[in-house]
Image: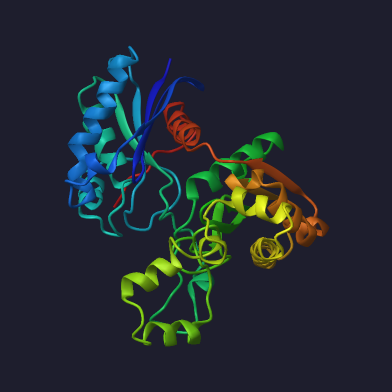
Amino acid sequence: MNRILVINPGSTSTKIAVYEEEKPLLLKTLRHSDEELKGYSVVVDQYSFRKQVILDELQSAGLALEGLTAVVGRGGLVKPIESGVYAVTEKLKQDLKVGVMGQHASNLGGLIADEIASGIAGARAFIADPVVVDELEDVARITGHPLLPRTSVFHALNHKAVGRRFAAHAEKAYEELNLIVAHMGGGVSVGAHRKGRIVDVNNALDGFGPFSPERAGTLPAGKLIDLCFSGKYSQEEVRAMVTGKGGLMAHLGTNQAYEAAQKALSGDEHAQLILRAMAYQIGKAIGGAMVVLKGQVDGIILTGGMAHNKVVLGYLREYIDFMGKLTIYPGEDEMEALAGNALMVLRGEMALKTYE
C-alpha cells in the first residue's frame, strides 16, 4: 500500500496532503502571515520554518512519517526540462537553492521533500511537472528577433493532469491524442498537446498570450517600449503592470474573475466589454493551437478556476463552440495531480527521470 506525502509551497501558504493510493487521508492549507515571513530575505531561508510547520501539522493529525513510500514536492524554477516525475538529486537541490530560473516558494517543495524522505527507510523524494516544463518545437521558439526567443513557463502540472484525465475517459493513452488545453486561472495558458508533448504554449507569466485576472498578456511592443523609456515608471513598476497588476486588475480594479462577472451581470457595460475581450483573446489562442495541430484535434479542454465562471464561459463559447469536442474540467487539483504522478512512478506506470 503506497502512502504519499504531497508538499506544495506557495508565497503565503504551504499546502500539504497525505494519500493512501488514490484516497486522501489529509488535505490542509497552512497559512503564513507577513509577520512570520518578513524576517526571511530570500525564499530559501524559509526552508527550516516551512519544514517544521509541515512536521507539526502531520503530528497534530496523528499521521506518522514511518510508512511513507514517497514524498513529492511541487517542482520549482529549475532549468527547462521535459514533463515528468524527477528524483530529487544533489544537482536538482543545488539548482533549487540557487534559483537558476528565479526565486519562488515552489523551490522549497523538492528540498523539503528530500529532507523528510531521507529520514524514512525506503521512502523516495520526487518533484513533478514544474512550471518550467519545456517541450516546445523549435519553430515555436522563434520570434522576430534572435535576442528574444519564446520561453515556456505555464501551468504544466494541471495541463498534463487534465490531458491524462481526458485520455482515461476516452479509454486511450494521453500519448495517442492531440489536445488543446486552456488553463484559465490567475494566469492563462493555452497549449497544443501533440501525442503527449506540449509543442506550443504561451508564456503565462511575463507577457505573452491572452490577458488574465492579473497578467497583461501580449502588449503592443512599440507602446511598451515608449512607456518603459518615458521616465514615468521604474522597471519594477512596469513589470508589475505586466505580471500582478495587469489584466482585470488594471481594467476593473480586481483580480477576482467572480467579482468582475458580478459587475457584468449587474449591467456594468465596461466589465462586460473587458470580460468579453479576455474571452476573445483566449478563443483566438485556442484557434491558434488548432492551427499548430493542423486541425487534427481529439479534444479541447477548458480548466482552471475561471472554468467555473459562467459569464466568462458564455463569452468564450460564442467563439469556440463551432470547433466542437469541448470538455470542461473546472478548477485544478494540484495535490491530487502531484500524488497521481508519484503513484504512477511507484506502480511502474511511468519512468522516473533524472535532472541533469
Q: How many marks?
A: 0
Relative vertical location of residue 217 with respect to residue 20 in this rendering, above or below: below
Name the residue nearer the viewer: 352 or 264: 264
Residue appearing at x 48%, y 72% in the figure: 141
Residue 98 coordinates in the image, percent (x, y)? 20, 54
Q: Quadrant of residue 245?
A: bottom left
Q: Quadrant of residue 205?
A: bottom left
**Left/right of residue 55 with respect to residue 317 in the rendered view:** left
Relative vertical location of residue 300 with respect to residue 270 in this rendering, above or below: above
Residue 65 coordinates in the image, percent (x, y)? 28, 18
Q: Is residue 299 visible?
A: no
Residue appearing at x 28%, y 15% in the figure: 66
Q: Is residue 66 visible?
A: yes
**Left/right of residue 261 with respect to residue 354 in the rendered view:** right
Colouring scheme, one of rainbow, by chain, secondary structure, one colour:
rainbow
Relative vertical location of residue 86 with respect to residue 289 in this rendering, above or below: above
Residue 313 coordinates in the image, percent (x, y)? 71, 51
Q: Quadrant of the N terminus?
A: top left
**Left/right of residue 1 with respect to residue 293 in the rendered view:** left
**Left/right of residue 318 with respect to residue 228 in the rendered view:** right
Residue appearing at x 51%, y 53% in the figure: 186
Name the residue nearer the viewer: 11 or 296: 11
Name the residue nearer the viewer: 240 or 206: 240
